[in-house]
Structures are given as C-alpha cells and as structure tokens.
Image (tube, grey):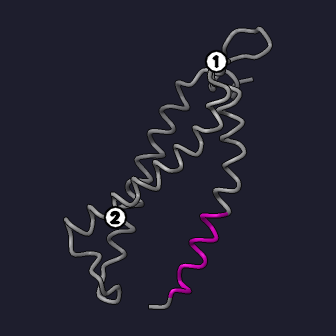
Amino acid sequence: MSALWLVLPIALAGAAEALYFPGQVRLFYEKFPKALKNSSTGMVAVLTALGLKLSTAFLSVIRHVTIWLPDDLNSSRLEKVYWVIAILATINFGIYLVCAKFYKYKSTNGTENVSVDEIAAS
C-alpha cells in the first residue's frame, strides 16, 4: 500500500483545522467569563491535544481488542475501523445537535439571553 493514499486525508484534515480554529478561538474568547478570557485561547490547544491523545488511545484499543490492524496493512481490515469511526462521528454529531438545541447565547449588549430556536424563528 502506498503512503500517497494518506496525502488527501491529511490535506483535508489540515484544511478543516485551518477553517475551524479561528472560529473556535473566537467562540471561546467571547463566551468565557471575563476572568477566564486569557485561558480561553489556551483551551483550544488543550482540547486539540486531548483529541490527538484520544485518537491514539482509540487506535491502541482497536489493535488490542480486534485483529483489524495488524502490522501488515495489506492484510488489515481498515474498512471496519472506518465504520467504527463513522459510527462514533454520527454519535458525536447527535450529541452536538442536542447541545446546540439547549444552548443559550450570552448577550453582549445588555439584552436578555436567547436560544438558538428563537434566533432561527426570527
């Protein structure tokens, strides 16, 4: 298996990170309490590092529990690993939708807090 198969996924992951990173920093900076404004930008790096550690742990568990990822990738079952990742991503998206449904925007101009549904209705 050629390592060139990794170019497109890595390029897409890099582009995705470049697009979400500024928005996440802005969200944390605007929505954190005033006392935590300085640590909000560091939170992005901490959460990224945590995600990388969790992905490494996930692959380690897959290697030890199943035979899907042997040392020889030509005899591996990568499609099963990708299906597990797709299922986990779907669950994660469902959790995101639930959290977004109940999220209340913190107003910055003195008006009362509004929910996502109220903004969508207006």
Q: Which residues are magenta?
A: 3-14
For marks 2 and 1, give the CA distance: 38 Å
Tag 2's secondary structure? helix
Report the amino acid beneath label 1: Ala
Q: Residue at x 38, y 53 (%)?
A: 88
Image quarter in which the N terminus is found = bottom left
User: Which mark identifies residue 122?
Assistant: none
Q: Earlier in the sequence, mark 2 or mark 1?
A: 1
What residue lies at 68% left-to-right and 39% top-to-bottom? 25
Tell me: 68 left or right of 40. left
Residue that carries the numbered disc 2 in the rendered image:
59
Q: Nearer the viewer, mark 2 or mark 1?
A: 1
Q: Position of residue 69 (x, y in %)?
A: 29, 76
Q: Residue at x 58, y 71 (%)?
A: 10
**Contact flag, marks 2 and 1 (Cβ < 8 Å):** no
In this image, 110 relative to 87: left or right? right
- Residue 7, located in which quarter of the rendered image? bottom right
The one of 98 and 42 positioned closer to us in this rendering: 42
- Give above or below for 59 relative to 113: below
Q: Quadrant of residue 81?
A: bottom left
Q: Is residue 77 magenta?
A: no
Which amino acid, by three-letter code, is at mark 2? Leu
In the displayed structure, would residue 28 be above or below residue 73? above
In the rendered structure, the answer to whether residue 73 lies left or right of residue 49 reads left
Give the residue at mark 1: 35
Q: Position of residue 93 (x, y in %)?
A: 48, 46
Among the 4 quarters of the image, the one containing residue 6:
bottom right
